[in-house]
Image (cartoon, coloured by chain):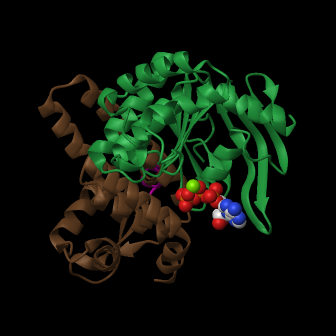
Protein backbone atom coordinates (compact mmCIF):
# COMPACT_ATOMS: atom_id res chain seq x y z
CA UNK A 1 0.00 0.00 0.00
CA UNK A 2 1.38 3.40 -0.86
CA UNK A 3 -1.25 5.46 0.99
CA UNK A 4 -3.27 4.29 3.94
CA UNK A 5 -5.67 5.77 6.47
CA UNK A 6 -6.22 3.64 9.57
CA UNK A 7 -9.17 4.46 11.81
CA UNK A 8 -8.76 8.15 11.09
CA UNK A 9 -11.07 10.54 12.97
CA UNK A 10 -11.18 14.30 12.51
CA UNK A 11 -13.53 16.95 13.90
CA UNK A 12 -13.97 20.67 13.36
CA UNK A 13 -15.11 21.95 16.75
CA UNK A 14 -18.20 19.91 17.50
CA UNK A 15 -18.64 18.76 13.87
CA UNK A 16 -17.33 15.24 13.38
CA UNK A 17 -16.11 15.04 9.77
CA UNK A 18 -14.38 11.60 9.82
CA UNK A 19 -15.24 8.66 12.06
CA UNK A 20 -12.56 5.96 12.13
CA UNK A 21 -12.17 6.08 8.37
CA UNK A 22 -10.10 3.40 6.66
CA UNK A 23 -8.69 3.47 3.15
CA UNK A 24 -5.85 1.60 1.49
CA UNK A 25 -4.54 2.56 -1.91
CA UNK A 26 -1.98 0.47 -3.78
CA UNK A 27 0.87 2.04 -5.75
CA UNK A 28 -0.22 2.93 -9.27
CA UNK A 29 -3.89 2.65 -8.46
CA UNK A 30 -6.47 5.27 -9.45
CA UNK A 31 -9.14 5.50 -6.75
CA UNK A 32 -12.23 7.70 -6.70
CA UNK A 33 -13.72 8.95 -3.43
CA UNK A 34 -17.44 9.55 -3.82
CA UNK A 35 -20.26 10.41 -1.43
CA UNK A 36 -22.77 13.10 -0.54
CA UNK A 37 -21.86 16.71 0.12
CA UNK A 38 -20.52 17.20 3.63
CA UNK A 39 -19.81 13.49 4.12
CA UNK A 40 -16.09 14.08 4.73
CA UNK A 41 -14.46 13.45 1.33
CA UNK A 42 -12.25 16.55 1.28
CA UNK A 43 -11.32 16.09 4.93
CA UNK A 44 -10.22 12.52 4.16
CA UNK A 45 -8.17 13.68 1.16
CA UNK A 46 -6.49 16.40 3.23
CA UNK A 47 -5.64 13.89 5.96
CA UNK A 48 -4.20 11.41 3.44
CA UNK A 49 -2.11 14.19 1.89
CA UNK A 50 -0.76 15.38 5.23
CA UNK A 51 -2.43 18.79 4.95
CA UNK A 52 -4.51 18.05 8.05
CA UNK A 53 -3.43 15.87 10.93
CA UNK A 54 -6.11 13.53 12.25
CA UNK A 55 -7.36 13.76 15.85
CA UNK A 56 -6.83 10.03 16.14
CA UNK A 57 -5.81 7.17 13.88
CA UNK A 58 -2.83 6.86 11.57
CA UNK A 59 -1.89 7.95 8.08
CA UNK A 60 0.82 6.04 6.24
CA UNK A 61 2.72 6.89 3.08
CA UNK A 62 5.06 4.36 1.50
CA UNK A 63 5.75 2.54 4.75
CA UNK A 64 6.15 5.71 6.86
CA UNK A 65 3.85 7.33 9.41
CA UNK A 66 2.83 10.67 7.93
CA UNK A 67 0.70 12.11 10.69
CA UNK A 68 3.49 12.05 13.29
CA UNK A 69 6.07 13.88 11.15
CA UNK A 70 6.78 17.46 12.17
CA UNK A 71 5.34 20.25 10.01
CA UNK A 72 8.57 20.91 8.16
CA UNK A 73 9.12 17.30 7.09
CA UNK A 74 5.48 16.93 6.20
CA UNK A 75 5.48 19.95 3.88
CA UNK A 76 8.76 18.79 2.38
CA UNK A 77 7.12 15.46 1.59
CA UNK A 78 4.08 17.18 0.12
CA UNK A 79 6.32 19.25 -2.13
CA UNK A 80 8.47 16.37 -3.35
CA UNK A 81 6.20 13.32 -3.38
CA UNK A 82 2.68 14.67 -3.88
CA UNK A 83 0.88 16.65 -6.57
CA UNK A 84 -2.40 18.49 -6.08
CA UNK A 85 -5.27 19.44 -8.37
CA UNK A 86 -8.22 21.31 -6.91
CA UNK A 87 -11.44 22.58 -8.42
CA UNK A 88 -9.98 26.07 -8.80
CA UNK A 89 -7.85 28.68 -7.11
CA UNK A 90 -4.46 27.01 -7.17
CA UNK A 91 -2.93 28.89 -10.10
CA UNK A 92 -1.53 32.41 -9.79
CA UNK A 93 -3.70 34.30 -12.30
CA UNK A 94 -1.14 37.06 -12.97
CA UNK A 95 1.55 34.55 -13.95
CA UNK A 96 1.76 32.83 -17.33
CA UNK A 97 0.86 29.16 -17.74
CA UNK A 98 4.57 28.31 -18.08
CA UNK A 99 5.50 30.24 -14.92
CA UNK A 100 2.72 28.51 -12.98
CA UNK A 101 3.99 25.09 -14.06
CA UNK A 102 7.58 26.03 -13.21
CA UNK A 103 6.73 27.30 -9.75
CA UNK A 104 7.01 24.01 -7.82
CA UNK A 105 10.31 23.25 -9.56
CA UNK A 106 11.76 26.66 -8.67
CA UNK A 107 10.58 26.21 -5.07
CA UNK A 108 12.51 22.94 -5.13
CA UNK A 109 15.60 24.83 -6.30
CA UNK A 110 15.67 23.43 -9.80
CA UNK A 111 17.75 25.66 -12.10
CA UNK A 112 15.60 28.05 -14.11
CA UNK A 113 16.75 26.83 -17.56
CA UNK A 114 15.96 23.26 -16.63
CA UNK A 115 12.61 24.23 -15.10
CA UNK A 116 11.66 26.09 -18.27
CA UNK A 117 12.39 23.04 -20.36
CA UNK A 118 10.39 20.75 -18.10
CA UNK A 119 7.45 23.14 -18.00
CA UNK A 120 7.38 23.38 -21.80
CA UNK A 121 7.48 19.60 -22.05
CA UNK A 122 4.54 19.22 -19.67
CA UNK A 123 2.50 21.94 -21.31
CA UNK A 124 2.93 20.09 -24.56
CA UNK A 125 1.80 16.79 -23.01
CA UNK A 126 -1.33 18.59 -21.86
CA UNK A 127 -1.93 19.96 -25.36
CA UNK A 128 -1.15 23.50 -24.23
CA UNK A 129 2.05 24.10 -26.19
CA UNK A 130 0.69 27.36 -27.70
CA UNK A 131 -0.58 28.79 -24.43
CA UNK A 132 2.59 28.78 -22.31
CA UNK A 133 2.88 32.57 -22.52
CA UNK A 134 -0.74 33.29 -21.66
CA UNK A 135 -1.65 34.54 -18.16
CA UNK A 136 -3.71 31.82 -16.49
CA UNK A 137 -6.36 34.35 -15.46
CA UNK A 138 -7.18 34.60 -19.16
CA UNK A 139 -7.62 30.87 -19.79
CA UNK A 140 -10.87 28.89 -20.02
CA UNK A 141 -11.77 26.60 -17.12
CA UNK A 142 -10.67 23.48 -19.01
CA UNK A 143 -7.38 25.05 -20.09
CA UNK A 144 -6.68 26.24 -16.55
CA UNK A 145 -7.30 22.74 -15.17
CA UNK A 146 -4.85 21.32 -17.70
CA UNK A 147 -2.24 23.84 -16.52
CA UNK A 148 -3.00 22.73 -12.95
CA UNK A 149 -2.42 19.09 -13.96
CA UNK A 150 0.89 20.01 -15.63
CA UNK A 151 1.89 21.80 -12.43
CA UNK A 152 0.88 18.80 -10.31
CA UNK A 153 2.82 16.32 -12.45
CA UNK A 154 5.94 18.35 -13.30
CA UNK A 155 7.66 17.31 -10.05
CA UNK A 156 7.08 13.61 -10.86
CA UNK A 157 4.99 12.98 -7.72
CA UNK A 158 4.31 9.48 -6.40
CA UNK A 159 0.72 10.43 -5.59
CA UNK A 160 -1.64 12.96 -7.15
CA UNK A 161 -4.47 14.18 -4.92
CA UNK A 162 -7.36 15.77 -6.80
CA UNK A 163 -10.49 17.33 -5.26
CA UNK A 164 -13.33 17.80 -7.78
CA UNK A 165 -10.85 18.53 -10.61
CA UNK A 166 -13.70 18.75 -13.14
CA UNK A 167 -16.30 20.27 -10.83
CA UNK A 168 -16.63 23.47 -12.84
CA UNK A 169 -16.41 21.91 -16.32
CA UNK A 170 -19.00 20.59 -18.78
CA UNK A 171 -19.21 16.87 -19.59
CA UNK A 172 -16.90 16.75 -22.61
CA UNK A 173 -14.30 19.13 -21.20
CA UNK A 174 -14.36 17.29 -17.89
CA UNK A 175 -13.88 14.00 -19.67
CA UNK A 176 -10.92 15.35 -21.62
CA UNK A 177 -9.31 16.71 -18.45
CA UNK A 178 -9.82 13.37 -16.65
CA UNK A 179 -8.45 11.39 -19.60
CA UNK A 180 -5.30 13.50 -19.53
CA UNK A 181 -4.93 13.37 -15.74
CA UNK A 182 -5.42 9.61 -15.48
CA UNK A 183 -3.58 8.77 -18.72
CA UNK A 184 -0.49 10.82 -17.85
CA UNK A 185 -0.45 9.67 -14.23
CA UNK A 186 -0.50 6.06 -15.43
CA UNK A 187 2.35 6.76 -17.86
CA UNK A 188 4.32 8.21 -14.94
CA UNK A 189 3.38 5.34 -12.64
CA UNK A 190 1.79 7.80 -10.22
CA UNK A 191 -1.06 6.89 -7.90
CA UNK A 192 -4.20 9.06 -8.18
CA UNK A 193 -6.77 9.71 -5.47
CA UNK A 194 -9.63 11.80 -6.81
CA UNK A 195 -12.63 13.17 -4.91
CA UNK A 196 -15.68 13.54 -7.11
CA UNK A 197 -19.45 13.36 -6.98
CA UNK A 198 -19.53 12.74 -10.73
CA UNK A 199 -19.98 9.06 -11.70
CA UNK A 200 -18.39 9.65 -15.10
CA UNK A 201 -15.25 11.01 -13.48
CA UNK A 202 -15.25 8.14 -10.98
CA UNK A 203 -15.58 5.68 -13.88
CA UNK A 204 -12.09 6.74 -15.05
CA UNK A 205 -10.72 5.24 -11.82
CA UNK A 206 -9.90 1.59 -11.15
CA UNK A 207 -12.41 1.52 -8.31
CA UNK A 208 -14.41 3.82 -6.07
CA UNK A 209 -15.13 4.08 -2.38
CA UNK A 210 -18.09 5.93 -0.90
CA UNK A 211 -17.81 8.21 2.13
CA UNK A 212 -21.02 8.45 4.11
CA UNK A 213 -21.31 10.34 7.35
CA UNK A 214 -17.54 10.30 7.89
CA UNK A 215 -17.10 6.59 7.28
CA UNK A 216 -15.55 4.96 4.22
CA UNK A 217 -17.57 2.24 2.56
CA UNK A 218 -15.68 0.03 0.12
CA UNK A 219 -18.21 -1.82 -2.04
CA UNK A 220 -15.60 -4.24 -3.36
CA UNK A 221 -14.03 -5.22 -0.03
CA UNK A 222 -14.83 -8.80 0.90
CA UNK A 223 -17.70 -8.94 3.33
CA UNK A 224 -18.83 -5.43 2.43
CA UNK A 225 -22.16 -6.74 1.11
CA UNK A 226 -24.24 -6.53 4.23
CA UNK B 1 -41.03 -9.27 -14.89
CA UNK B 2 -41.41 -7.71 -11.46
CA UNK B 3 -45.12 -8.58 -11.02
CA UNK B 4 -44.70 -12.18 -9.78
CA UNK B 5 -41.95 -11.14 -7.36
CA UNK B 6 -43.96 -8.16 -6.11
CA UNK B 7 -47.01 -10.37 -5.49
CA UNK B 8 -44.82 -12.93 -3.71
CA UNK B 9 -43.35 -10.17 -1.58
CA UNK B 10 -46.80 -8.87 -0.67
CA UNK B 11 -47.79 -12.41 0.27
CA UNK B 12 -44.76 -12.71 2.50
CA UNK B 13 -46.25 -9.89 4.59
CA UNK B 14 -49.48 -11.80 5.10
CA UNK B 15 -51.66 -14.33 3.27
CA UNK B 16 -54.25 -12.58 1.09
CA UNK B 17 -57.02 -12.91 -1.42
CA UNK B 18 -56.41 -11.98 -5.03
CA UNK B 19 -58.51 -8.87 -4.67
CA UNK B 20 -56.49 -7.52 -1.73
CA UNK B 21 -53.24 -8.35 -3.50
CA UNK B 22 -54.30 -6.38 -6.54
CA UNK B 23 -55.29 -3.42 -4.37
CA UNK B 24 -51.95 -3.45 -2.52
CA UNK B 25 -50.01 -3.89 -5.74
CA UNK B 26 -51.79 -0.92 -7.33
CA UNK B 27 -51.20 1.21 -4.22
CA UNK B 28 -47.46 0.58 -4.00
CA UNK B 29 -46.31 -0.34 -7.48
CA UNK B 30 -49.14 0.45 -9.93
CA UNK B 31 -48.05 4.06 -10.66
CA UNK B 32 -51.27 4.76 -12.54
CA UNK B 33 -51.18 1.42 -14.34
CA UNK B 34 -53.43 -0.88 -12.31
CA UNK B 35 -52.83 -4.60 -12.57
CA UNK B 36 -55.68 -6.37 -14.44
CA UNK B 37 -57.50 -8.99 -12.35
CA UNK B 38 -56.82 -11.55 -15.06
CA UNK B 39 -53.08 -11.08 -14.67
CA UNK B 40 -53.30 -11.34 -10.88
CA UNK B 41 -55.03 -14.72 -11.07
CA UNK B 42 -52.91 -16.10 -13.91
CA UNK B 43 -49.76 -15.07 -12.04
CA UNK B 44 -51.00 -16.65 -8.81
CA UNK B 45 -51.87 -19.79 -10.77
CA UNK B 46 -48.34 -20.07 -12.13
CA UNK B 47 -46.83 -19.37 -8.71
CA UNK B 48 -49.01 -22.12 -7.21
CA UNK B 49 -48.04 -24.54 -9.98
CA UNK B 50 -44.35 -23.83 -9.25
CA UNK B 51 -44.86 -24.42 -5.53
CA UNK B 52 -44.14 -20.82 -4.50
CA UNK B 53 -47.62 -20.15 -3.09
CA UNK B 54 -50.51 -22.30 -1.89
CA UNK B 55 -54.16 -21.43 -2.45
CA UNK B 56 -56.50 -22.40 0.38
CA UNK B 57 -60.12 -22.66 -0.79
CA UNK B 58 -62.69 -21.05 1.44
CA UNK B 59 -66.46 -21.51 1.52
CA UNK B 60 -68.46 -19.41 -0.95
CA UNK B 61 -68.10 -18.89 -4.66
CA UNK B 62 -66.53 -16.55 -7.18
CA UNK B 63 -62.90 -16.37 -8.21
CA UNK B 64 -61.90 -14.76 -4.93
CA UNK B 65 -62.68 -17.60 -2.57
CA UNK B 66 -59.05 -18.64 -2.44
CA UNK B 67 -56.69 -17.32 0.19
CA UNK B 68 -53.07 -17.43 -0.96
CA UNK B 69 -50.03 -17.95 1.24
CA UNK B 70 -46.32 -17.97 0.41
CA UNK B 71 -44.32 -21.22 0.72
CA UNK B 72 -40.71 -21.56 1.93
CA UNK B 73 -39.68 -21.85 -1.73
CA UNK B 74 -41.48 -18.58 -2.52
CA UNK B 75 -39.87 -16.90 0.48
CA UNK B 76 -36.46 -18.06 -0.73
CA UNK B 77 -37.14 -16.57 -4.14
CA UNK B 78 -38.07 -13.19 -2.67
CA UNK B 79 -35.02 -13.21 -0.42
CA UNK B 80 -32.71 -13.92 -3.35
CA UNK B 81 -34.32 -11.35 -5.61
CA UNK B 82 -34.05 -8.60 -3.03
CA UNK B 83 -30.31 -9.02 -2.57
CA UNK B 84 -29.40 -9.43 -6.22
CA UNK B 85 -28.42 -6.30 -8.10
CA UNK B 86 -29.88 -6.36 -11.60
CA UNK B 87 -27.64 -6.03 -14.62
CA UNK B 88 -26.84 -2.37 -15.17
CA UNK B 89 -29.04 -1.37 -18.09
CA UNK B 90 -31.03 1.75 -18.87
CA UNK B 91 -34.71 2.09 -17.86
CA UNK B 92 -34.56 0.30 -14.53
CA UNK B 93 -36.90 2.65 -12.69
CA UNK B 94 -39.66 0.11 -12.02
CA UNK B 95 -37.47 -2.71 -10.80
CA UNK B 96 -35.17 -0.56 -8.64
CA UNK B 97 -38.12 1.16 -7.01
CA UNK B 98 -39.97 -2.10 -6.40
CA UNK B 99 -36.96 -3.72 -4.79
CA UNK B 100 -36.41 -0.81 -2.42
CA UNK B 101 -40.04 -0.47 -1.32
CA UNK B 102 -40.48 -4.21 -0.88
CA UNK B 103 -37.23 -4.55 1.06
CA UNK B 104 -38.35 -1.79 3.44
CA UNK B 105 -41.80 -3.30 3.75
CA UNK B 106 -40.28 -6.64 4.76
CA UNK B 107 -37.64 -5.14 7.06
CA UNK B 108 -34.81 -6.29 4.76
CA UNK B 109 -31.55 -4.46 4.12
CA UNK B 110 -32.59 -1.90 1.53
CA UNK B 111 -29.41 0.15 2.11
CA UNK B 112 -27.26 -2.91 1.44
CA UNK B 113 -29.15 -3.56 -1.75
CA UNK B 114 -28.66 0.04 -2.91
CA UNK B 115 -24.92 -0.21 -2.18
CA UNK B 116 -24.69 -3.39 -4.24
CA UNK B 117 -26.69 -1.85 -7.07
CA UNK B 118 -24.51 1.24 -7.01
CA UNK B 119 -21.36 -0.89 -7.31
CA UNK B 120 -22.89 -2.85 -10.19
CA UNK B 121 -23.75 0.37 -12.01
CA UNK B 122 -20.26 1.78 -11.41
CA UNK B 123 -18.69 -1.39 -12.79
CA UNK B 124 -20.73 -0.98 -15.95
CA UNK B 125 -19.77 2.71 -16.15
CA UNK B 126 -16.11 1.66 -16.12
CA UNK B 127 -16.68 -0.92 -18.85
CA UNK B 128 -18.38 1.71 -21.00
CA UNK B 129 -15.53 4.15 -20.32
CA UNK B 130 -13.16 1.50 -21.69
CA UNK B 131 -15.38 1.01 -24.75
CA UNK B 132 -15.20 4.75 -25.38
CA UNK B 133 -11.40 4.82 -25.11
CA UNK B 134 -10.88 2.08 -27.65
CA UNK B 135 -13.85 2.58 -29.95
CA UNK B 136 -15.09 4.62 -32.87
CA UNK B 137 -17.18 7.75 -32.49
CA UNK B 138 -20.40 5.77 -32.95
CA UNK B 139 -19.29 3.32 -30.24
CA UNK B 140 -18.50 6.29 -28.01
CA UNK B 141 -21.86 7.96 -28.60
CA UNK B 142 -23.77 4.76 -27.92
CA UNK B 143 -21.73 4.20 -24.78
CA UNK B 144 -22.46 7.80 -23.77
CA UNK B 145 -26.18 7.24 -24.12
CA UNK B 146 -26.02 4.23 -21.84
CA UNK B 147 -23.80 6.12 -19.39
CA UNK B 148 -26.21 9.05 -19.07
CA UNK B 149 -28.99 6.62 -18.16
CA UNK B 150 -26.79 4.86 -15.64
CA UNK B 151 -25.86 8.26 -14.18
CA UNK B 152 -29.55 9.04 -13.77
CA UNK B 153 -30.03 5.75 -11.91
CA UNK B 154 -26.97 6.46 -9.76
CA UNK B 155 -28.32 9.86 -8.78
CA UNK B 156 -31.61 8.26 -7.92
CA UNK B 157 -29.82 5.60 -5.87
CA UNK B 158 -27.97 8.33 -3.92
CA UNK B 159 -31.08 10.41 -3.32
CA UNK B 160 -33.03 7.33 -2.22
CA UNK B 161 -30.18 6.19 0.01
CA UNK B 162 -30.28 9.62 1.69
CA UNK B 163 -34.05 9.41 2.24
CA UNK B 164 -34.32 5.75 3.15
CA UNK B 165 -35.37 6.47 6.72
CA UNK B 166 -38.30 8.63 5.66
CA UNK B 167 -39.33 6.15 2.96
CA UNK B 168 -39.23 3.28 5.46
CA UNK B 169 -41.55 5.18 7.81
CA UNK B 170 -43.95 5.91 4.98
CA UNK B 171 -44.01 2.34 3.71
CA UNK B 172 -44.52 0.86 7.17
CA UNK B 173 -47.26 3.34 8.02
CA UNK B 174 -49.33 2.42 4.92
N1 LIG C 1 -13.04 24.43 8.05
C1 LIG C 1 -14.14 23.85 8.55
N2 LIG C 1 -14.71 24.30 9.69
C2 LIG C 1 -15.80 23.72 10.22
N3 LIG C 1 -16.42 22.65 9.67
C3 LIG C 1 -15.92 22.15 8.54
C4 LIG C 1 -14.74 22.71 7.92
N4 LIG C 1 -14.47 22.00 6.81
C5 LIG C 1 -15.42 21.03 6.75
N5 LIG C 1 -16.28 21.13 7.78
C6 LIG C 1 -17.43 20.22 8.05
O1 LIG C 1 -16.97 18.88 8.05
C7 LIG C 1 -17.87 18.02 7.37
C8 LIG C 1 -17.15 17.34 6.22
O2 LIG C 1 -16.73 18.33 5.30
P1 LIG C 1 -15.95 17.98 3.96
O3 LIG C 1 -15.53 19.28 3.36
O4 LIG C 1 -14.89 16.99 4.24
O5 LIG C 1 -17.11 17.31 3.09
P2 LIG C 1 -17.13 16.89 1.55
O6 LIG C 1 -17.58 15.49 1.51
O7 LIG C 1 -15.84 17.24 0.91
O8 LIG C 1 -18.32 17.82 0.98
P3 LIG C 1 -18.49 18.51 -0.49
O9 LIG C 1 -18.89 17.43 -1.41
O10 LIG C 1 -19.61 19.49 -0.26
O11 LIG C 1 -17.19 19.16 -0.83
C9 LIG C 1 -19.04 18.90 6.94
O12 LIG C 1 -20.05 18.77 7.91
C10 LIG C 1 -18.45 20.29 6.95
O13 LIG C 1 -19.44 21.24 7.24
MG1 LIG D 1 -15.25 18.64 -0.57
Q: In this rendering, would A167 be left or right of A219?
A: left
Residue A106: x and y, percent?
62, 27
Of residues B11 and B123, the one drawn nearer to the viewer in this rendering: B123
From where the camera sits, is residue B86 visible?
no
Q: In this rendering, would B81 be left or right of A106?
A: left
* Secondary structure mostly seen in the magenta stretch: helix
The C terminus of chain B sits in image quarter: bottom left
Of residues A133 and B122, the one drawn nearer to the viewer in this rendering: A133
What's the residue at 25%, 22% (across, down)?
Answer: B134
Of residues B11 and B80, the one drawn nearer to the viewer in this rendering: B80
Look at the image and give the residue range highlighted in magenta.
B71-76
Q: Quadrant of residue A12?
A: bottom right
Residue B147: x and y, percent?
28, 44
The chain assigned the colour brown in the figure is B
Where A43 sits versus A121, above or below? Answer: below
Chain A is which colour? Answer: green
Where A149 sits versus B101, above or below? Answer: above
Amino acid sequence: MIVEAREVSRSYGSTVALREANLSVAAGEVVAIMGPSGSGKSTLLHCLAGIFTPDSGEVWFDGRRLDTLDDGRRSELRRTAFGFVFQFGQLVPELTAADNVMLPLLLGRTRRKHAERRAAEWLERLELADLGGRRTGELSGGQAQRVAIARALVTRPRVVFADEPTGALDTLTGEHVMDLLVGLAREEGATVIVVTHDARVAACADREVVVRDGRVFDPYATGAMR
Amino acid sequence: MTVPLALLGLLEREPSHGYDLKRDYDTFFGRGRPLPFGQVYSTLGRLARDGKVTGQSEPGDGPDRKRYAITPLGRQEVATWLTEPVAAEPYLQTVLFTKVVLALMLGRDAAGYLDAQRATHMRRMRELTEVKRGGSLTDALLADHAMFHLEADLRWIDVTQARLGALAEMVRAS
